[in-house]
Image (spheres, rainbow, N blue to C red):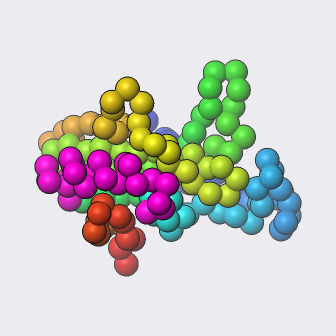
Amino acid sequence: MRLILLMAAVSGLVGYSGAFQPGATTAGVSAAFRPSFRECVAAWNAPDNGVQRALVARVFVPAGYTQAGIQMALTTGVPGRLDPNPVGCRVLFFRHDRWVAYLARRTGAQFRFRAGGLPYGRQSDQHGIWSKTAQRGPNNARIISGAKLALRG
């Protein structure tokens, strides 16, 4: 249920044009910039995200995580200090019973995954198990060489 609410909130933020005029800025980002799956894929495939891609290619793809999806996500910041640029993205790799996810924040108008890998020897930002009745996905991306991604369709 929380995921559905999160997705609805993100959809509202991403689709909101409100009172902004073209060219207006908030936190130095053009109001005309709308985060998209395409920008998320570009950030995942970028050279500075090579550590995470190599990990996925080495550990998860051989273990059967052969489906991929892109989602928009909210980055809330830290307690007492809200993130001024709250729409991030999430890259999900999954198989029939498990999933792992990597989160990107926006810096200016670009998504950025953690440079240099994850802290404390972790292998993903998030991970979980699908229940038998859970809907898998999204399945809106495909894995290409070296765990790079391409959008479907």
| Residue at (43, 63) in percent of width and height | 45
User: In this rendering, is residue 62 above or below 33?
Assistant: above
Q: Main secondary structure of the magenta part?
A: helix
User: In this rendering, is residue 79 above or below 21?
Assistant: above
Can residue 97 be found in the magenta stretch? no
| Residue at (68, 45) in percent of width and height | 85
Q: Residue furthest bottom?
A: 153
Question: Magenta residues, as a range?
Answer: 45-66
Whether residue 18 is visible here, answered yes or no, is: no
| Residue at (69, 31) in percent of width and height | 82
53 and 18: which is toward the camera: 53
98 and 123: which is toward the camera: 123
Return the x and y of residue 35 as percentages of the image width and height. Answer: 60, 60
Return the x and y of residue 139 as percentages of the image width and height. Answer: 31, 62
| Residue at (37, 78) in percent of width and height | 153
Left or right of 99 on screen, residue 112: right
Return the x and y of residue 70 as percentages of the image width and height. Answer: 41, 58
Please identify the quadrant where the N terminus is shown: top left
Can residue 53 be found in the magenta stretch? yes
User: In this rendering, is residue 9 above or below 83?
Assistant: below
